[in-house]
Amino acid sequence: MFYEEIHKAQSDREYMAAWRKVNLAREGQDTFITLNNCEAYVSGNPEVFSPDPAMTNATQMLLNIAGDFTGKSVLDVGTGTGIISIVAGKNNARAVLATDIHEPSLTCARYNVEKHDLGNIVTIIKSDMFENVKERFDLIIANLPFGDIYNHLDIDRNSVAYQFFANVRNYINEGGRILVASASFGNVEEVRKLIGEMNLEPIEHKEKKFGVEWSVFEFCM
Ligand SMILES: C[S@@+](CC[C@H](N)C(=O)[O-])C[C@H]1O[C@@H](n2cnc3c(N)ncnc32)[C@H](O)[C@@H]1O
């Protein structure tokens, strides 16, 4: 019922307020969403991020820019429901490692991977950022919490953003690609600054939707 407010939002603040209402209304109600023809169960725990394209544009934008997964090894950092890994697995990725720090999200992702019978391609592990990641990948995809207008996260050395950009080079193959989502309601200016400080050169893809400017930073290594 509040979806309409998300769709009509004209600014970051309006979007975030509407998103919070919709997200709270999910409590206790298991739902299903479809992205790239793949269905995922979304737990009724509002702490499990819903990639519902009626609520967010980040996940869909990452998938659009990722393009062809065929034959690639993929690292999905902060997998949530596992939807990115499932789309990769269903579209002929060679191997996918899905990580998350949040136990209810891992449970949801495990359920979805099993339901799609992708256990031979998608491996799910608990990991704080790259803590338990031991290999390099052809494609790294991340939609991580870099802070928002309600929950400003300082981008210091302990932050999720710093930990990601300071270490990601150690996990990408030569010739690989890294895709990272951000948005105007988040710390996008600070993320851009951090990327510069790390001497990473992005292509920044931008889309306007729900009154928000969504960004995906693409790094070709
Ligand atoms: C915005 S959600 C994105 C979920 C999914 N990638 C998607 O696009 O639908 C961010 C995810 O990152 C996870 N996360 C947050 N901090 C993390 C960390 N330090 N290491 C791994 N995952 C983390 C959260 O638990 C959450 O599932």
Image (cartoon, grey):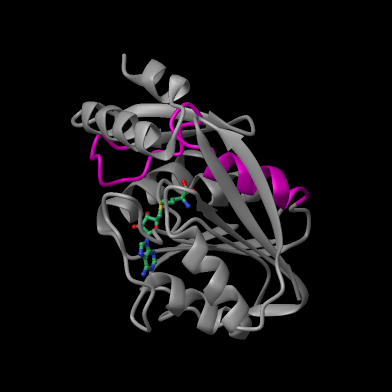
Q: Is residue 90 visible?
A: no
Residue 56 highlighted magenta (yes or no): yes
Question: Which residue is found at the position 70% from the left and 67% from the top?
Answer: 202
Looking at the rendered image, the quarter that the C terminus falls into is bottom right
Q: Position of residue 20 (x, y in %)?
A: 27, 35
Residue nearest the viewer, comparing 58 with 16: 16
Q: Quadrant of ligand 1?
A: bottom left
Q: Residue furthest left?
A: 28
Q: How many marks can you see?
A: 0
Question: Which residue is found at the position 26% from the left and 58% from the top?
Answer: 103
Q: Position of residue 6 (x, y in %)?
A: 41, 25
Residue nearest the viewer, comparing 211 with 52: 211
Residue 191 highlighted magenta (yes or no): no
Eyeballing the image, is 127 above or below 56?
below
Q: Position of residue 163 (x, y in %)?
A: 44, 79
Magenta segment, prevailing SS (helix, strand or loop): loop
Eyeballing the image, is 167 above or below 71?
below
Eyeballing the image, is 177 above or below 46?
below
Report the magenta residues as a range: 43-68
Q: Position of residue 9 (x, y in %)?
A: 43, 26
Question: Which residue is found at the position 26% from the left and 46% from the top?
Answer: 47
Q: Residue furthest right?
A: 175
Residue nearest the viewer, comparing 135 with 20: 20
Q: Is residue 11 left or right of residue 25?
A: right
Question: Which residue is found at the position 56% from the left and 48% from the top?
Answer: 84
Q: Is residue 77 left or right of residue 36?
A: left
Q: Is residue 83 visible?
A: yes
Q: Is residue 46 left or right of residue 155?
A: left
Looking at the rendered image, the quarter that the N terminus falls into is top left
